[in-house]
Image (cartoon, rainbow, N blue to C red):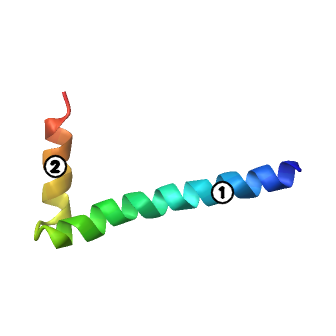
C-alpha cells in the first residue's frame, strides 16, 4: 500500500513538472516571447 502511495506521489510530481515545463516553453512560443523574458517579467510582477 505504501508503494502505491509513493508511485502516486511520483506521478503527481511528474505531472506538475511537465505542467511547469509547458508553462516555461510552450506558452512563450505561443505568445512569441522569449522564455527568459517571460520569466523575468513574471518574477518582477510578484509583490
The disc placed on residue 40 is 2
Query: Residue shown at 84%/54% (left/top)?
Result: 3
Q: In the rendered structure, which disc, 2 or 1, sits on the residue that comes first in sequence? A: 1
Q: Badge 2, how many Cα within 10 Å: few under 14, some, many 20+?
A: few
The disc placed on residue 10 is 1
Query: Residue shown at 14%/37% (left/top)?
Result: 45
Q: Secondary structure at mark 2?
A: helix
In the rendered image, the quadrant that contains the C terminus is top left
The disc placed on residue 22 is none
Q: Secondary structure at mark 1?
A: helix
* Residue 22 placement (x, y as % from top left): 35, 65
Query: Residue shown at 53%/60% (left/top)?
Result: 15
Query: Residue shown at 20%/42% (left/top)?
Result: 43
Residue sitting farthest toward the right? 1
* Residue 20 placement (x, y as % from top left): 39, 57
Q: Total of numbered circles in the picture?
A: 2
* Residue 17 placement (x, y as % from top left): 48, 59
Left or right: 28, with 12 as reference point: left
* Residue 6 placement (x, y as % from top left): 75, 52
Task: Between label 2 and label 1, give the one nearer the viewer.
Answer: 1
Compared with 17, 26 (above or below) is: below
Amino acid at each position: 500500500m505504501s508503494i502505491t502511495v509513493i508511485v502516486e506521489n511520483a506521478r503527481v510530481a511528474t505531472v506538475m513538472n511537465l505542467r511547469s515545463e509547458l508553462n516555461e516553453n510552450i506558452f512563450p512560443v505561443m505568445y512569441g516571447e522569449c522564455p527568459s523574458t517571460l520569466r523575468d517579467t513574471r518574477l518582477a510582477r510578484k509583490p
